[in-house]
Image (cartoon, rainbow, N blue to C red):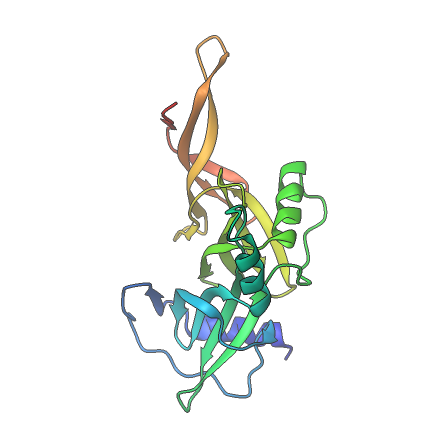
Amino acid sequence: MNKTMLFVVALAVVAGCRHVQGGSMKSAAPFLGDNATLPGVQAAEPLNGKPLERSGALALFSGETAEDAAFNEAERQNYQKFRNSLFLRRRMADGTYEWRLLLTTGSDWRVPAGLGDWCSEQAGNLKRCFCVNTASFSSDGQHLWLVCDTGNYMWSIVCAYDVNNNMLRPLIDGDSATEQPDGTILVKGKKVYLYDKNGEPDGAGLCDVWITPEGNIIRKSKPERLNN
Protein backbone atom coordinates (compact mmCIF):
# COMPACT_ATOMS: atom_id res chain seq x y z
CA MET A 1 0.00 0.00 0.00
CA ASN A 2 1.49 3.37 -0.99
CA LYS A 3 1.80 6.29 1.40
CA THR A 4 -1.18 8.24 0.12
CA MET A 5 -3.45 5.23 0.47
CA LEU A 6 -2.20 4.76 4.03
CA PHE A 7 -3.10 8.39 4.72
CA VAL A 8 -6.59 7.85 3.32
CA VAL A 9 -7.02 4.76 5.49
CA ALA A 10 -5.74 6.69 8.50
CA LEU A 11 -8.29 9.44 8.00
CA ALA A 12 -11.07 6.95 7.41
CA VAL A 13 -10.25 5.29 10.75
CA VAL A 14 -10.66 8.55 12.61
CA ALA A 15 -13.51 9.98 10.53
CA GLY A 16 -15.93 11.91 12.70
CA CYS A 17 -13.46 12.36 15.57
CA ARG A 18 -12.84 16.05 15.01
CA HIS A 19 -11.31 18.70 17.20
CA VAL A 20 -11.98 22.36 16.53
CA GLN A 21 -9.47 24.83 17.91
CA GLY A 22 -10.59 25.71 21.41
CA GLY A 23 -12.92 22.69 21.57
CA SER A 24 -12.47 19.07 22.60
CA MET A 25 -12.51 15.62 21.06
CA LYS A 26 -15.99 14.21 20.62
CA SER A 27 -14.74 10.62 20.72
CA ALA A 28 -11.49 8.73 21.21
CA ALA A 29 -9.64 7.49 18.14
CA PRO A 30 -7.12 4.64 17.95
CA PHE A 31 -3.44 5.37 17.50
CA LEU A 32 -2.06 4.83 14.05
CA GLY A 33 0.69 2.29 13.58
CA ASP A 34 4.10 3.85 14.03
CA ASN A 35 5.28 2.28 10.77
CA ALA A 36 2.58 3.85 8.57
CA THR A 37 4.01 6.41 6.16
CA LEU A 38 2.15 9.69 5.71
CA PRO A 39 2.37 12.13 2.77
CA GLY A 40 4.76 15.05 2.72
CA VAL A 41 8.34 15.06 3.93
CA GLN A 42 9.63 14.56 7.45
CA ALA A 43 10.15 17.90 9.16
CA ALA A 44 11.07 19.55 12.42
CA GLU A 45 8.35 21.08 14.56
CA PRO A 46 7.35 24.34 12.84
CA LEU A 47 8.18 27.77 14.15
CA ASN A 48 5.14 29.73 15.38
CA GLY A 49 2.94 26.69 14.91
CA LYS A 50 -0.83 27.20 15.01
CA PRO A 51 -3.25 24.24 15.32
CA LEU A 52 -5.89 24.22 12.59
CA GLU A 53 -7.77 20.93 13.09
CA ARG A 54 -7.29 17.60 14.84
CA SER A 55 -8.73 14.24 13.83
CA GLY A 56 -7.72 11.43 16.15
CA ALA A 57 -3.94 11.03 16.13
CA LEU A 58 -3.57 13.43 13.20
CA ALA A 59 -3.48 17.22 13.38
CA LEU A 60 -3.02 19.99 10.84
CA PHE A 61 -0.90 23.02 11.70
CA SER A 62 0.19 26.19 9.98
CA GLY A 63 3.70 27.29 10.84
CA GLU A 64 6.99 28.55 9.51
CA THR A 65 9.94 26.67 8.13
CA ALA A 66 13.37 28.25 8.57
CA GLU A 67 13.02 29.58 5.01
CA ASP A 68 9.60 31.07 5.81
CA ALA A 69 10.98 32.75 8.92
CA ALA A 70 13.90 34.27 7.01
CA PHE A 71 11.55 35.54 4.30
CA ASN A 72 9.14 37.05 6.82
CA GLU A 73 11.96 38.77 8.69
CA ALA A 74 13.22 40.31 5.45
CA GLU A 75 9.69 41.49 4.58
CA ARG A 76 8.93 42.81 8.05
CA GLN A 77 9.86 46.40 7.20
CA ASN A 78 7.73 46.39 4.03
CA TYR A 79 4.62 44.74 5.47
CA GLN A 80 3.86 43.48 1.98
CA LYS A 81 3.94 39.68 2.14
CA PHE A 82 3.84 36.91 4.68
CA ARG A 83 4.25 33.22 4.07
CA ASN A 84 3.92 30.03 6.08
CA SER A 85 3.54 26.31 5.46
CA LEU A 86 1.08 23.49 6.11
CA PHE A 87 2.20 20.71 8.46
CA LEU A 88 0.71 17.37 9.48
CA ARG A 89 1.44 16.09 12.97
CA ARG A 90 0.92 12.50 14.09
CA ARG A 91 0.79 11.43 17.71
CA MET A 92 2.73 8.19 18.11
CA ALA A 93 1.84 5.37 20.49
CA ASP A 94 4.70 6.31 22.83
CA GLY A 95 3.42 9.87 23.17
CA THR A 96 5.97 11.46 20.83
CA TYR A 97 5.07 13.34 17.64
CA GLU A 98 6.00 12.94 14.00
CA TRP A 99 5.89 16.10 11.87
CA ARG A 100 5.37 16.12 8.09
CA LEU A 101 5.63 19.16 5.82
CA LEU A 102 2.78 19.01 3.28
CA LEU A 103 2.77 22.35 1.44
CA THR A 104 5.24 25.22 1.38
CA THR A 105 6.42 27.92 -1.01
CA GLY A 106 8.01 26.40 -4.10
CA SER A 107 7.36 22.76 -3.17
CA ASP A 108 6.48 20.25 -5.86
CA TRP A 109 2.70 20.04 -5.59
CA ARG A 110 0.83 19.55 -8.84
CA VAL A 111 -1.83 21.82 -10.36
CA PRO A 112 -4.72 20.42 -12.44
CA ALA A 113 -4.64 20.96 -16.18
CA GLY A 114 -7.25 23.16 -17.80
CA LEU A 115 -7.72 25.71 -15.02
CA GLY A 116 -9.35 29.00 -15.96
CA ASP A 117 -7.33 32.20 -16.05
CA TRP A 118 -8.25 33.31 -12.53
CA CYS A 119 -7.49 29.95 -10.92
CA SER A 120 -4.25 29.61 -12.89
CA GLU A 121 -3.13 33.03 -11.69
CA GLN A 122 -3.90 32.17 -8.07
CA ALA A 123 -2.09 28.84 -8.38
CA GLY A 124 1.02 30.71 -9.53
CA ASN A 125 0.72 33.19 -6.67
CA LEU A 126 0.51 30.35 -4.13
CA LYS A 127 3.54 28.63 -5.62
CA ARG A 128 5.54 31.86 -5.23
CA CYS A 129 4.30 32.74 -1.74
CA PHE A 130 2.25 30.10 0.09
CA CYS A 131 0.23 31.13 3.12
CA VAL A 132 -2.53 29.00 4.65
CA ASN A 133 -5.14 30.48 7.00
CA THR A 134 -7.32 27.43 7.70
CA ALA A 135 -7.25 23.73 6.82
CA SER A 136 -9.56 20.81 7.55
CA PHE A 137 -9.84 17.11 6.74
CA SER A 138 -12.47 15.86 4.30
CA SER A 139 -14.88 13.23 5.60
CA ASP A 140 -13.68 10.61 3.09
CA GLY A 141 -9.96 11.22 3.59
CA GLN A 142 -9.39 12.23 -0.02
CA HIS A 143 -8.84 15.96 0.38
CA LEU A 144 -7.88 18.77 2.67
CA TRP A 145 -9.97 21.94 2.41
CA LEU A 146 -7.80 25.04 2.64
CA VAL A 147 -8.29 28.80 2.82
CA CYS A 148 -5.11 30.52 1.65
CA ASP A 149 -4.00 34.14 1.73
CA THR A 150 -3.39 35.75 -1.66
CA GLY A 151 -0.86 38.24 -0.32
CA ASN A 152 -2.81 41.26 -1.60
CA TYR A 153 -5.27 41.48 1.36
CA MET A 154 -8.23 41.82 -1.03
CA TRP A 155 -9.49 38.23 -0.92
CA SER A 156 -8.64 34.73 0.22
CA ILE A 157 -8.61 31.60 -1.92
CA VAL A 158 -10.45 28.38 -1.13
CA CYS A 159 -8.43 25.37 -2.34
CA ALA A 160 -8.70 21.59 -2.38
CA TYR A 161 -5.56 19.54 -1.76
CA ASP A 162 -5.82 15.97 -3.08
CA VAL A 163 -3.69 13.74 -0.87
CA ASN A 164 -3.70 10.91 -3.43
CA ASN A 165 -1.83 12.78 -6.14
CA ASN A 166 -0.32 15.81 -4.37
CA MET A 167 -2.53 18.19 -6.35
CA LEU A 168 -3.57 21.65 -5.15
CA ARG A 169 -6.62 23.13 -6.89
CA PRO A 170 -7.69 26.75 -6.32
CA LEU A 171 -11.49 26.69 -6.33
CA ILE A 172 -13.02 30.08 -5.56
CA ASP A 173 -12.50 33.22 -3.52
CA GLY A 174 -13.90 33.20 0.02
CA ASP A 175 -13.11 33.26 3.72
CA SER A 176 -14.07 29.74 4.83
CA ALA A 177 -14.45 26.17 3.56
CA THR A 178 -16.71 23.89 5.61
CA GLU A 179 -17.76 20.48 4.34
CA GLN A 180 -21.52 19.89 4.58
CA PRO A 181 -23.44 16.64 5.17
CA ASP A 182 -24.56 16.61 1.52
CA GLY A 183 -20.94 16.70 0.30
CA THR A 184 -20.94 20.34 -0.75
CA ILE A 185 -18.45 22.87 0.63
CA LEU A 186 -19.88 25.98 2.29
CA VAL A 187 -17.78 29.03 1.38
CA LYS A 188 -18.52 32.26 3.23
CA GLY A 189 -17.48 35.72 2.13
CA LYS A 190 -17.39 35.28 -1.63
CA LYS A 191 -17.20 38.65 -3.37
CA VAL A 192 -19.82 39.36 -6.03
CA TYR A 193 -20.51 42.36 -8.23
CA LEU A 194 -23.98 43.93 -8.10
CA TYR A 195 -26.06 45.40 -10.89
CA ASP A 196 -29.12 47.63 -10.90
CA LYS A 197 -32.41 46.88 -12.65
CA ASN A 198 -31.00 48.28 -15.88
CA GLY A 199 -28.02 45.97 -15.78
CA GLU A 200 -25.57 48.71 -14.86
CA PRO A 201 -22.78 48.09 -12.30
CA ASP A 202 -24.00 48.89 -8.79
CA GLY A 203 -21.14 48.15 -6.39
CA ALA A 204 -20.08 44.91 -4.77
CA GLY A 205 -21.29 42.56 -2.06
CA LEU A 206 -20.51 39.37 -0.19
CA CYS A 207 -22.49 36.14 -0.19
CA ASP A 208 -22.26 32.53 0.94
CA VAL A 209 -22.00 29.84 -1.72
CA TRP A 210 -22.21 26.05 -1.67
CA ILE A 211 -19.81 24.44 -4.13
CA THR A 212 -18.89 20.96 -5.31
CA PRO A 213 -15.38 19.64 -4.50
CA GLU A 214 -14.47 20.74 -8.04
CA GLY A 215 -15.51 24.34 -7.34
CA ASN A 216 -18.87 24.49 -9.16
CA ILE A 217 -21.46 26.66 -7.41
CA ILE A 218 -24.63 24.73 -6.47
CA ARG A 219 -26.48 27.54 -4.69
CA LYS A 220 -25.79 30.86 -3.01
CA SER A 221 -27.29 33.27 -0.53
CA LYS A 222 -28.54 36.78 -1.19
CA PRO A 223 -25.55 39.14 -1.34
CA GLU A 224 -24.99 41.71 1.37
CA ARG A 225 -23.76 45.00 -0.03
CA LEU A 226 -20.27 46.11 0.89
CA ASN A 227 -20.01 49.59 2.32
CA ASN A 228 -18.28 51.96 -0.08
The quadrant where residue 14 appears: bottom left
Kindly identify the residue that appears in the image at 41 percent across and 91 percent down: 94
Left or right: residue 113 versus residue 201 is: right
The quadrant where residue 85 appears: bottom right
Q: Is residue 6 visible?
A: yes
Above or below 140: residue 168: above
Q: Which residue is the extreme one toward the front?
A: 77
The quadrant of the rendering that contains the C terminus is top left
Above or below 155: residue 139: below
Kindly identify the residue that appears in the image at 42 percent across and 34 percent down: 220
Above or below 165: residue 3: below
Count of numbered badges drawn on the protein = 0
The quadrant of the rendering that contains the N terminus is bottom right
Residue 197 position in % (x across, y down)? 44, 10
Kindly identify the residue that appears in the image at 41 percent across and 32 percent down: 206
Residue 116 position in % (x across, y down)? 67, 39
Residue 10 position in % (x across, y down)? 49, 75
Q: Is residue 141 visible?
A: no
Q: Which residue is the extreme one toward the bottom?
A: 94
Q: Nearer the viewer, residue 78 or 15?
A: 78
Q: Nearer the viewer, residue 220 or 159?
A: 159
Q: Which residue is the extreme one toward the top?
A: 198
Q: Nearer the viewer, residue 63 or 55?
A: 63
Residue 221 position in % (x across, y down)? 38, 33
